[in-house]
């Protein structure tokens, strides 16, 4: 089981009992934090995808310690000009220990996909009145449902003409 969560403006793939290094957080060492912006949750074959985030999902973590990352050397040089600049940088980081991933009140992506397929079927009166509101993919789906052939290579106007017959 894992989740993709947004922490301090960056996305991380996290699992339970994993240690993650993120940009420095304001919380003190030893405190628990919760992140509500969970973008994806996977549990075996069940995948829940948020749009953009999953409602009711959260990841709880504990701040282990604050530290500085490895030194990064930035060296700029222009050949034959005598220009050389050397600069170093150490990023401030926070080490997190992921304690729990909880998802409640959410539906899986397969359930949302079935809802999307049911929506065009539920309104047959709109199909006959104004087909130009639909996308090409929806029009092709309507042609498939009606048992029409040769619709895959047609453009939007041709599909509307075919379905209005």
Image (cartoon, rainbow, N blue to C red):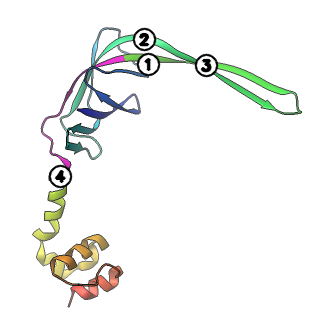
Q: Position of residue 76 (x, y in %)?
A: 74, 29
Q: CA distance from mark 1 to mark 4?
A: 37 Å
Give whichever of discs 1 and 3 has the lower sequence position.
Answer: 1
Count of all numbered marks drawn on residues in the image? 4
Q: Position of residue 70 (x, y in %)?
A: 55, 17
Reading the image, the residue beneath label 1 is 24
Give whichever of discs 1 and 4 has the lower sequence position.
Answer: 1
Q: CA distance from mark 3 to mark 2?
A: 16 Å
Task: Give the number of the mark in front: 1 or 4.
Answer: 4
Mark 1: which secondary structure? loop
Q: CA distance from mark 2 to mark 1?
A: 7 Å
Reading the image, the residue beneath label 3 is 89
Badge 3 density bin: few <14, some 14–19, many ≥20, Cα 10 Å: few
Which residue is located at x 13 percent, y 35 percent?
A: 104
From this view, report whether residue 10 is shown above or below residue 17: below
Which residue is located at x 32 percent, y 86 percent?
A: 158
Give whichever of discs 4 and 3 has the lower sequence position.
Answer: 3
Mark 4: which secondary structure? helix
Reading the image, the residue beneath label 4 is 110
Q: Position of residue 69 (x, y in %)?
A: 51, 16
Q: Are marks 2 and 1 in contact (CB under 8 Å)?
A: yes
Q: CA distance from mark 2 to mark 4?
A: 40 Å
């Amino acid at each position: 089981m894992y989740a993709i969560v947004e922490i301090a403006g960056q996305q991380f793939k996290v699992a339970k009992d994993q240690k993650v290094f993120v940009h420095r957080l304001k919380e003190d060492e030893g405190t628990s934090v919760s992140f509500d912006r969970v973008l994806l949750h996977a549990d075996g074959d069940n995948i829940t995808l948020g749009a953009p985030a999953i409602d009711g999902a959260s990841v709880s973590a504990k701040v282990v310690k604050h530290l500085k990352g490895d030194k990064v050397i930035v060296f700029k040089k222009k050949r034959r000009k005598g220009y050389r600049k050397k600069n170093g940088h150490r990023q401030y980081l926070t080490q997190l220990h992921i304690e729990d991933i909880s998802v409640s009140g959410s539906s899986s992506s397969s359930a949302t996909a079935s809802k999307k397929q049911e929506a065009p079927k539920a309104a047959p009166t709109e199909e006959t009145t104004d087909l130009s509101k639909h996308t090409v993919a929806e029009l092709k789906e309507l042609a498939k449902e009606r048992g029409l052939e040769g619709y895959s290579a047609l453009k939007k106007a041709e599909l509307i003409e075919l379905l209005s017959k």
